[in-house]
Image (cartoon, rainbow, N blue to C red):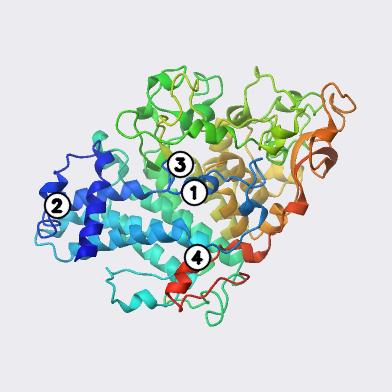
């Protein structure tokens, strides 16, 4: 009983910052015997789950921040042991610990729903929310560890499940799928959620999370297969599949159907104010607060792109971490810079519009608007640093400002930024649709590109992709879909997950991470502008640039990188294995 009281107290206290969603009863007026007796009690408990999402309020002082912002990947110059493949055993893991704590809260609400004496319809939405959040937590665990123990009841200290084995990744995914399908049936459409309740989970949020999970698991099984599973007897979680487990094509087809329904019937739209914001829509979207957060006077009510997001507010719930500082330090690598297309829709090595690298600013011309939005503007002077500490600190000429507050720190001081954190937005749903279609059929029609990939490109000033263009310029359409996803979803907890599910993490993450191009620029052989000895790893030839192989500053050497297939999953925390000898460690640790 003491354990239940403790969990109940956590649930009640954590609702404090959700006042914008509902009127709360005083927690000290409630007791275990009186709680979960009314529909409002279930509503209060369900609202507490929103605080447990991995968003601006970092749970662990940095680890979640690094993964959510894709730090240490090939896209930026903030280097981490994880990004280098230098992954070691740890005693604890906050994602493991916190996720199971949150799952317990989800299970408590679901158990109490079975005892509710009122009409089931009164609490149906809150039951659906509990299943949504349980799926969210298990999917987070799945992406990180693979198979984990699946617990769907409220345990006590004598429960045999505490000493249970890991479920396979397939059993975990099946639980995620079943929970989200049940949540879809019980949640309201976004159009049915009133203005004062915006931010609550909608049916489309559950559909989009399920579409993401289906694409993730389908492509993981297609490209990674069972290579990370272990045998479940000596290591890993094994390969057991539950009865009725879907095929890869079945998962892809369902992802297509779910995405299409959101696109056609969800009422969402891409946030596009390029005319008002000098083509910097994709800068202002991610720091949108009140009318003072941008030159056009737009506020969050104009944003119909975010489908599943964590809601923040300058008065009621600030981010409470220096978002602007954190994003600024995740500067863009030359690897990432060279991924942005020219405005004619062609890669820089195929486009006549690409201006080269002679000066730092030339490569910014005639490019995707997102390059300016995330890294600077046409008017911004970009100066090559000639100080070793600049690169060693993770900096570059190409500063990142996605998520950075407008007019920082004048409009918002550090740790007061309160932009909403997007977990899934419409642009990703478009890209899920395009990728799942192509993975399913091996082709995608121009009409299908025009309703998915091309609206995302259009907002960024990039010409549409067509099958004729792909044929004329020898473009791989799947690679172009993947490129679009990489460029669009920078710093949105996507890159590591994508590289692993595509089965190419060891290929990409073992390559050097490059800083600026030097060969053929104004900086080459000019000691007044550039001192090669200032950089620890010197220069090397970057194989792909807009002008063929060229020497560039090596920001992080391949000698620092040792990614292998065993790094696709993180190790089970040592303390968990010590507590439960039935848990087997992932292969390679």
Mark 1 or 3, nearer chain start: 1
Mark 4 vs 3: CB contact within 8 A: no
List the residue tagged with mark 4. 573
Taking the image as shown, residue 509 lies to the left or right of residue 487, namely right
Mark 4 or 3, nearer chain start: 3
Image depth: mark 2 or mark 4 in front: 4
Image depth: mark 4 or mark 3 in front: 4
Classify the position of the N terminus by image quarter. bottom left
Mark 2 or 1, nearer chain start: 2
List the residue tagged with mark 3. 426
Seen from the viewer's position, the closer of residues 134 and 27 is: 27
Image depth: mark 1 or mark 4 in front: 4
Circle on res. 64:
1
Seen from the viewer's position, the closer of residues 332 and 195 is: 332
Mark 2 vs 3: CB contact within 8 A: no
Mark 2 vs 4: CB contact within 8 A: no
Taking the image as shown, residue 233 lies to the left or right of residue 477, namely left
List the residue tagged with mark 2. 39
Image depth: mark 1 or mark 3 in front: 1
């Amino acid at each position: 009983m003491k354990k239940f009281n403790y969990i109940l107290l956590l649930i009640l206290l954590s609702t404090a910052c959700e006042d914008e969603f509902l009127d709360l009863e005083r927690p000290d007026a409630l007791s275990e015997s009186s709680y979960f007796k009314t529909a409002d009690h279930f509503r209060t408990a369900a609202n507490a789950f929103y605080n447990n999402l991995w968003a601006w309020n970092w749970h662990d002082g940095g680890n979640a921040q690094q993964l959510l912002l894709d730090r240490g990947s090939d896209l930026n110059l903030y280097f981490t042991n994880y990004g280098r493949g230098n992954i070691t055993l740890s005693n604890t893991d906050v994602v493991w610990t916190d996720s199971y704590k949150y799952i317990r809260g989800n299970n408590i609400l679901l158990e109490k729903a079975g005892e509710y004496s009122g009409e089931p319809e009164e609490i149906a939405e809150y039951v659906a929310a509990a299943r949504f959040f349980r799926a969210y937590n298990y999917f987070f665990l799945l992406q990180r560890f693979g198979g984990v123990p699946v617990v769907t009841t409220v345990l006590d200290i004598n429960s045999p499940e505490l000493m249970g084995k890991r479920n396979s990744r397939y059993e975990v995914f099946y639980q995620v799928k079943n929970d989200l399908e049940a949540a879809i049936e019980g949640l309201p459409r976004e159009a049915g959620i009133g203005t004062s309740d915006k931010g609550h989970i909608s049916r489309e949020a559950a559909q989009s999370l399920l579409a993401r999970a289906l694409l993730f698991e389908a492509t993981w099984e297609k490209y990674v297969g069972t290579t990370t599973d272990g045998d479940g007897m000596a290591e890993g979680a094994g390969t057991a599949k539950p009865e009725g487990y879907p095929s890869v094509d079945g998962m892809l087809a369902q992802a297509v159907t779910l995405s299409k329904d959101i696109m056609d019937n969800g009422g969402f739209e891409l946030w596009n104010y390029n005319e008002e914001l000098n083509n910097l829509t994709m800068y202002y979207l991610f720091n949108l607060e009140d009318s003072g957060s941008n030159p056009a006077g737009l506020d969050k009510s104009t944003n119909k792109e975010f489908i599943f997001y964590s809601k923040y507010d300058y008065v009621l719930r600030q981010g409470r971490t220096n978002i602007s500082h954190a994003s600024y330090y995740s500067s863009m690598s030359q690897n990432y810079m060279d991924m942005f297309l020219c405005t004619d829709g062609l890669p820089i090595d195929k486009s006549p519009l690409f201006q080269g690298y002679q000066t730092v600013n030339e490569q910014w011309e005639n490019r995707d608007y997102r390059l300016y939005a995330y890294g600077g503007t046409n008017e911004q002077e970009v100066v090559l640093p000639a100080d070793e500490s600049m690169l060693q600190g993770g900096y570059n000429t190409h500063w990142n400002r996605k998520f950075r507050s407008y007019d920082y720190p004048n409009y918002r001081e550090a740790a007061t930024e309160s932009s909403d954190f997007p977990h899934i937005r419409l642009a990703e749903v478009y890209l899920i649709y395009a990728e799942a279609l192509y993975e399913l059929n091996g082709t995608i029609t121009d009409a299908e590109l025009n309703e998915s990939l091309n609206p995302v490109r259009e907002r960024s000033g990039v010409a549409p992709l067509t099958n004729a263009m792909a044929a004329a310029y020898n473009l791989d359409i799947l690679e172009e879909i993947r490129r679009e996803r990489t460029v669009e979803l920078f710093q949105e907890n996507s890159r590591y997950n994508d590289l692993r599910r595509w089965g190419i993490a060891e290929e990409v993450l073992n390559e050097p991470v490059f800083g600026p191009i030097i060969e053929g620029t104004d900086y080459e052989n000019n000691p007044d502008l550039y001192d090669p000895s200032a950089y620890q790893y010197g220069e090397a030839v970057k194989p792909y640039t807009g002008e063929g192989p060229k020497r560039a500053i090596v920001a992080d050497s391949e000698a620092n990188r040792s990614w292998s297939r065993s790094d696709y999953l993180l190790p089970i925390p040592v303390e968990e294995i010590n507590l439960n000898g039935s848990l087997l460690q992932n292969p390679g640790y």
